[in-house]
Each structure stands twice: as C-alpha cells, then as structure tokens.
Image (spheres, rainbow, N blue to C red):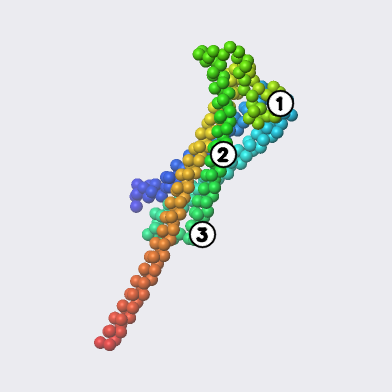
Amino acid sequence: MGCFECCIKCLGGVPYASLVATILCFSGVALFCGCGHVALTGTISILENHFSKITSDHAMLTDVIQLMQYVIYGIASFFFLYGIILLAEGFYTTSAVKELHSEFKTTICGRCISGMFVFLTYILGIAWLGVFGFSAVPVFLFYNMWSTCAAMRSPVSNFTNLDSICVDVRQYGIIPWNATPGKACGSTLGDICNTSEFYLSYHLYIVACAGAGATVIALIHFLMILSANWAYLKDASHMHAYQDIKMKEERELHDITSRSKECLNSYT
C-alpha cells in the first residue's frame, strides 16, 4: 500500500461530524465564558459608579457575580475535557463501523458507554437551553437602557423635559430598593450610555448569548451523532452475532458432509 492509499485510509477514519461539533462546542463555550466573565466585571463597575454607590447595598450582587465567574471557570474546564472525550468516542465508533466486516468486534461495555454519553449529552443540552435563556436576560436589560438613550438622542424626539426619562435598575431586582441613587435620568443616563464600560459590556453580553446558542447547537449535533453511532454499534454487534452463528452452522454442515462422505467411502 502506497503513501496516498494510507492517507486516504486514515482520512476515511476521521469522524468529521464529531470534529465539526467539537469545534463548534469549543467556540461557543469560549465565547460564552470569556465574554461573560468580562461583561460581569463591567456590570459591577457600572453599578458601583452610577447606581449603587454604597458598597453594602450591592454586596450580595457582587458575591453572586464572583460566584458566577468561578462557575464559568468550571464550565470551561469541564467542556474542554468533555469535548475531547466525545471526539475520541467518535473516532472509536467510526473505527467500529469501518471495520464492520473484519475481525473488529464491539463490546457490551463500549455500547453502554455510548448510551451513557447519549443520556449525558441530552441532560447537558437541556441545561444549556436554560443557560441560553438566562444569558438573554442581561442583553434585554442593557438593550432597554440603550434604546432609552437612543430615543433621547434622536433628532425626531420631542421630549420637553429629559430629566423625566429615567432607567431604574431597582425594578429588576438587581439591587435593593433602598440603594442610592438606584436610577439614572436625563443627561446622567446619556453619560452612562456613552461610557466604554457600558458599550463593551452590552456587546459582550450579546456575544456571550450567541456563544451559548452555538453551544446548544453543538450539543444537539453531538446528540444526533451519538444516537446514530449507538445505533450503528448495536447493528454491528447483531451483524457479528449473525456472522458467528452462520460460520458455526457452516462449519457444522461441513463436518456433517465430511463424515457422510467418509461413511459412504467406507461402505463402498
């Protein structure tokens, strides 16, 4: 076998579907974790500088955000390992299917592991749907503030008193009602929208939400791949069992034929 034939055989054993899903999963998790971490830090800075200048008023929120940042570290580490494991499982399953008619045989343990990955990926997909919905909440909050500022700056707006236009973050439950000042009105609100922290955090939350959506798509892709691979492994095991029974029957038939010929020769 030449070098070209070896390369073609090696490329034929690559699980391209699992490879694409792994790249999409890594990209989505990286966007969600990286952008989400920086956006949370910017959110704390905006609250401290403009909405809650007393540290005790937003102490709980600060602790929650720090906890979420630690959770982001764990999510990134877990999905890095899980993506590699699923890619390795894709290589294993592809090899099992490619060698269907050779001496390669799947084991019950291998099929059980494939089934376990199907169940675990299904649970993770449901969990990431919740993460995707949760990541859309800060996008909605920042969009409300941005749209209010855009309405004030619009040349067609006919507001007579801009100080009456306010954004009160206390109504979202982010900070308590006794926090001061708790809201921003008029020119103060416009200054907040013009800060680099607000602009960066708003767009990072959008990218983080898109990353969560990409991760959901990747997990759905993985789920389809794992389900198909598990079915292929099950069919492969049935095919090998059928071939074993067929070879055993052919061997027995050959032995019976040989004994019959021997008996016939002895009689003759």
Residue 148 x %, y %: 56, 21
User: Residue 204, located in which quarter of the rendered image?
Assistant: top right
Front tag of 1 and 2: 1
Give the residue drawn at x 45%, y 48%: 225
- Which one is earlier in the sequence, the residue at label 1 or at label 2? 2
Q: On the rendered structure, is 97 left or right of 88?
A: left
In the image, is residue 13 above or below residue 182? below
Residue under label 2, please give it. 131
Q: Are marks 2 and 3 in contact (CB under 8 Å)?
A: no
- The residue labelled by disc 1 is 179
Q: Check if mark 3's residue and mark 1's residue have beta carbons within 8 Å.
A: no
Residue 122 in view here: yes
Which residue is depicted at the point 60% across and 13% down? 161
**Which residue in the structure is indicated by mark 3?**
109
Number of marks in the rendered image: 3
Residue pushed farthest left?
268
199 or 103: nearer the viewer: 199
Give the crowd class for mark 2: few <14, some 14-19, many >=20 residues within 10 Å: some
Which amino acid, by three-letter code, is at mark 1?
Ala
Residue 90 visible to the viewer: no
Residue type of the residue flagged with mark 2: Val
Instruction: Please state the horizontal and vertical placement of residue 102, each as a whole percent of the image.
Output: 39, 60
Marks 2 and 3, the one that precedes in the sequence: 3
**x then y, percent, for residue 219:** 50, 44
Frontmost residue, 179 versus 104: 179
